Amino acid sequence: MNFNTWMEEKIKKTEEYLSNFVEVKDNPQKLIYEAMNYSLLSGGKRLRPVLLLGTYEMFREDDEAAMPFACAIEMIHTYSLIHDDLPAMDNDDYRRGRLSNHKKFGEAAAVLAGDGLLNKAFETGLKAALEYNIGTERAVKALLEIARSSGSDGMIGGQVVDMFGHEKISTVEDLKYMYSLKTGAIIKSSVIAGAILGGADEKELNALEIFAEKTGLAFQIEDDLLDVTGTIEKLGKATGSDEANNKITYLTFATIQEAKNEVSSLTAEAIKSLDVFGEKSVRLSELAGYLTSRDH
């Protein structure tokens, strides 16, 4: 099976599972289910779930037990996008090619939809820990990794630095620190949670941490590039928002070509870190290349 077919199968399976998690009930709070599903089921590349599943399958053949955790990661990612798009944050009107959640349902409903998805993520993971023969300790450790990465020492912390810490970002290293939290932490936890669920040993986890950190940083630098070089037709969201919002990005410190060179270098280092796995890591290597060479 070639990479594109493999990727499509993982995305399709993730989509199928996601469609079953937020049931639209005919009750007084029906709006919240509709708002949650509006963003959760709006497409997207499902990169984080695929990272988790791709890592897990290096250790286990059947990914059925890992699917709820992959979907939980996507719920957290989607909640963060809903909140990022709010007027108080990035103030974006479009996401994944259509109106962002707050433009469709209003700001209050969008805030609550994001909150709902965050809670649903951990409900989903905890339920899977009880129902699947995956090992309670492994499941709890994987959820702990996901929780840390999405909290104040991970994604939320990175968003705070991004929004309120501009005076503290004076060097490219400061920026990389922010990126390691805001974007890199969730990418890293997708990989590490998949490895924990699969039963990776300490040496394997260490190698995967390097892989995830390098890939996460390259992914964010590529995102900075796309905000300048991409189009709304290709990306499904407005471009040029970083400059419009006076954001500090990698291109504040480097030229476009230098940024491209850094993406290539980081990706090569990420793939090199997987040597310990031999042929088992071919999908992760291909994923790293895909994540850091997006033009769509």
Image (tube, grey):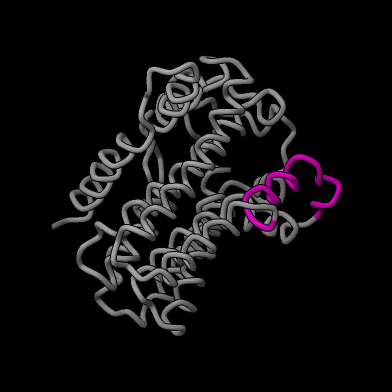
Residue 76 x %, y %: 51, 44
Relative to 139, is 35 above or below?
A: above
Q: Per the image, is 248 magenta? A: no
**Residue placed farthest to the right in the image?**
167
Relative to 288, is 38 above or below?
A: above
Residue 214 x %, y %: 52, 65
* Residue for point 54% across, 65% down: 213
Residue 70 x %, y %: 38, 52
Q: Per the image, is 162 magenta? A: yes
> Can you tell which quarter of the image residue 238 is in?
top right
Residue 23 visible in the displayed image: yes
> Can you tell which quarter of the image residue 84 is in?
top right
**Residue placed farthest to the front in the image?**
27
Would residue 203 appear left or right of 213 to someone viewing this image? left
Q: Nearer the viewer, residue 26 or 117?
A: 26
Instruction: State how many labels appear.
Output: 0
* Residue for point 50% across, 20% down: 29
Image quarter (top left, top right, bottom left or bottom right) of the C terminus: top left
* Majority secondary structure in the magenta region: helix
Q: Nearer the viewer, residue 82 or 281?
A: 82
Residue 210 x %, y %: 51, 72
Image quarter (top left, top right, bottom left or bottom right) of the N terminus: bottom left
Magenta residues?
153-170
